[in-house]
Image: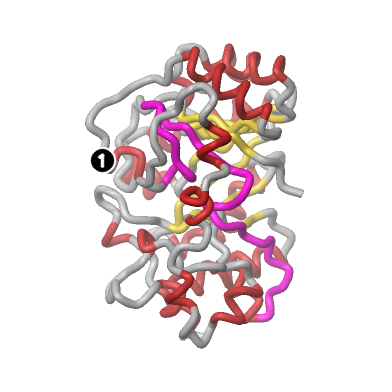
């Protein structure tokens, strides 16, 4: 059963300027979350029953008191801490400090081979990420590799995954992420045909014994079931019960990639926002569109309870991406 997760965007600072990064789409500056706010939020989250702390950025290792936050989370009783990073700042010392703390896992971003990764993230980014990956694995830190899938790397994904698992068999898994709208990502977004290919190749890799999955997109589950691939790990909705996020500027959201905000965090108001009808409504918004869709039964079987995120869509934009994709089967 999935643990309820409190997410904190500790910083918006980052040493990279990735072409597709949603975190910089509307950024007007960079900030760190006040340490006192992080502690208050952790207290309230724990009282609400959250068991897992998710720390993200920006680049999380640029947050000055990252290890203090981890220590305080564990003192308070959080069962696990999950950290998103690009890996560049994981040197021997950082890896050692992570390894000294129990129940800490990381996701590390690798967008394919060196040429593609550096085209997205800048020269030298691939080698820096691989060094961080190696340092983390040397200390037996659980590492999940996150790979954004786009039109330029789609065909490379099976070989990339095979090479990575052969070189680093201790990796927990590779998670594929559908590219969404970003500052410079529109031309690289997956078409409906591309997305079907991604789901099919992921399912076939699972059949071949590879630990791969698709992140937070139940359209993949609906497609896989329609194609007869019932073994593909289910992909949960990005906005779902048991999750809430506080951004570095102190505002509250339902997930990191959304521009929805539910007001500023103030001590004592997290539970009220989480339990509000407005917050719950994001999990079902747009369901009226589904009512007249011929694929509604197949989508519901896959856990897709509302139309796909419009940030994944391609022209024509007036037809939901999920409808265009399911129409292909």
x, y percent for residue 26: 26, 40
Q: Is residue 63 above or below residue 251?
A: above
x, y percent for residue 9: 46, 30
**Residue 277 in view in this figure:** yes
The front one of 88 and 101 is 101
The front one of 64 and 237 is 237
Residue 75, image quadrant: top right
The front one of 40 and 147 is 40
Magenta stretch?
Answer: 228-257
x, y percent for residue 76: 70, 18
Q: Is residue 285 above or below residue 110?
A: below
Q: Is residue 241 magenta?
A: yes
Q: Secondary structure at mark 1?
A: loop
Q: Is residue 108 above or below residue 111?
A: above
Q: Residue at x 59, y 34 (%)?
A: 6
The front one of 153 and 232 is 232
Query: To which residue does mark 1 refer?
Result: 26
Q: How many numbered callouts?
A: 1
- Decide whether the magenta segment is chiefly helix, strand or loop: loop
Q: In the image as oriented, which residue stretches furthest toward the right?
A: 1
Q: Is residue 8 above or below residue 208?
A: above
Q: Residue at x 40, y 48 (%)?
A: 258
x, y percent for residue 300: 61, 74
Q: Residues within 10 Å of mark 1 (few under 14, many from 20)?
A: few
> Which color mode does the image show?
secondary structure
Q: Taking 138 as reference, is 286 left or right?
A: left
Q: Is residue 320 magenta?
A: no
Q: Taking 140 as reference, is 277 left or right?
A: left
**Residue 100 in view in this figure:** no
Q: Taking 186 as reference, is 12 left or right?
A: right
């Amino acid at each position: 059963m999935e643990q309820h997760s409190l997410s904190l965007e500790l910083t918006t600072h980052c040493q990279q300027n990735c072409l597709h990064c949603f975190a910089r789409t509307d950024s007007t500056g960079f900030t760190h979350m006040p340490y006192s706010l992080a502690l208050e939020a952790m207290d309230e989250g724990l009282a609400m029953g959250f068991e897992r702390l998710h720390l993200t950025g920006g680049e999380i290792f640029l947050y000055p008191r990252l290890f203090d936050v981890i220590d305080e989370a564990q003192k308070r009783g959080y069962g696990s801490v999950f950290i998103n990073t690009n890996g560049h700042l994981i040197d021997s010392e950082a890896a050692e400090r992570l390894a000294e703390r129990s129940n800490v896992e990381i996701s590390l971003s690798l967008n394919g081979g060196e040429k593609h990764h550096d085209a997205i993230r800048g020269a030298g980014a691939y080698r820096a990420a691989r060094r961080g990956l190696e340092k983390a694995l040397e200390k037996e830190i659980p590492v999940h590799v996150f790979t954004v899938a786009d039109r330029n790397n789609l065909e490379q994904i099976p070989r990339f995954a095979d090479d990575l698992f052969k070189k680093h068999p201790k990796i927990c898994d590779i998670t594929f992420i559908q590219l969404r709208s970003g500052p410079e990502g529109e031309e690289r977004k997956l078409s409906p045909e591309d997305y079907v290919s991604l789901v099919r190749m992921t399912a076939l890799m699972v059949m071949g014994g590879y630990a791969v999955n698709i992140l937070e997109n139940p359209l993949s589950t609906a497609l896989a079931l329609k194609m007869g691939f019932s073994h593909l790990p289910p992909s949960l909705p990005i906005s779902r019960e048991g999750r809430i996020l506080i951004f570095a500027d102190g505002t509250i959201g339902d997930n990191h990639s959304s521009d929805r905000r539910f007001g500023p965090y103030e001590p004592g108001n997290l539970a009220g926002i989480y339990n509000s009808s407005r917050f719950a409504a994001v999990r079902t918004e747009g369901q009226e569109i589904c009512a007249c869709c011929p694929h509604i039964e197949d989508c519901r079987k896959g856990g897709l309870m509302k139309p796909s995120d419009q940030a994944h869509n391609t022209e024509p934009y007036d037809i939901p991406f999920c409808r265009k994709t399911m129409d292909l089967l």
